[in-house]
Image (cartoon, grey):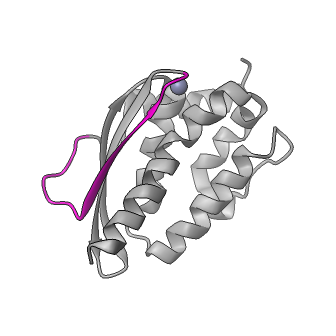
């Protein structure tokens, strides 16, 4: 797999220095998702304050793409409302479905556009999406508990 070297650097940086890693004891909802095809595992928990995502913490193991992607997700979505988060998640899902044809929208995705290159590799799309699918799930569960 060949990714643009700058992109690769940002992904590796998040992999080596993950953001918001380490689960919180104080959460509204928590989920665990696995990507069997690669062996990636992510547990994600969320704390909601009204509609605001006041904390997103995670733990996990797996390939650099899955771990860097969830690290970036928690960075992007913490402090956003659920409505704002849904727009970002939709944008990332569309990017991952683009098969390499979309550069991604940096005004919405910020650093997460570095995963644009991954969308060319169907086997790795699941790795990049794992944390985002977990987020969708945990957001729904947290809203049910409000
Ligand atoms: Zn993976």
Identify whether 73 is placed above or below 78. above
* Residue sticking out furthest to the bottom: 50
Quadrant for the C terminus, please. Answer: bottom left
Identify whether 66 is placed above or below 105. above
Tell me what residue is drawn at x 37 percent, y 79 percent: 51
Q: Nearer the viewer, residue 128 or 38?
A: 38
Residue 137: x percent and y percent? 43, 56
Tell me what residue is drawn at x 69 percent, y 33 percent: 118
Residue 56: quadrant of the picture: bottom left
Is 21 left or right of 113, judged from the image as shown?
A: left
* Residue sticking out furthest to the top: 1
Tell me what residue is drawn at x 81 percent, y 39 percent: 99
Quadrant for the N terminus, please. Answer: top right
Is 125 left or right of 146, judged from the image as shown?
A: right
Total marks in image = 0
Q: Is residue 78 visible?
A: no
Residue 120: x percent and y percent? 78, 32
Identify whether 71 is placed above or below 124. below
Q: Nearer the viewer, residue 52 or 122?
A: 122
Tell me what residue is drawn at x 49 percent, y 25 percent: 36
Residue 75: x percent and y percent? 42, 53
Q: Look at the image and say whether residue 79 sits in the magenta stretch.
A: no
Q: Is residue 8 visible?
A: yes
Q: Which residues are magenta?
A: 22-37
Residue 91: x percent and y percent? 67, 59
């Amino acid at each position: 797999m060949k990714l643009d070297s700058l992109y690769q650097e940002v992904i590796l940086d998040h992999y080596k220095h993950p953001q918001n890693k380490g689960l919180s004891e104080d959460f509204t909802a928590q989920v665990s998702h696995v990507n069997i095809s690669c062996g990636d595992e992510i547990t994600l928990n969320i704390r909601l304050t009204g509609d605001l995502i006041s904390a997103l913490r995670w733990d996990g193991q797996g390939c650099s793409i899955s771990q860097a992607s969830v690290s970036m997700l928690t960075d992007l979505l913490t402090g956003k409302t659920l409505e704002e988060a849904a727009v970002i998640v939709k944008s990332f899902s569309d990017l991952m479905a683009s098969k390499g044809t979309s550069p991604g929208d940096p005004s919405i995705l910020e650093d997460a556009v570095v995963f644009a290159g991954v969308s060319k590799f169907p086997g790795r799309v699941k790795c990049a999406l794992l944390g985002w699918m977990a987020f969708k799930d945990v957001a729904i569960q947290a809203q049910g508990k409000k």
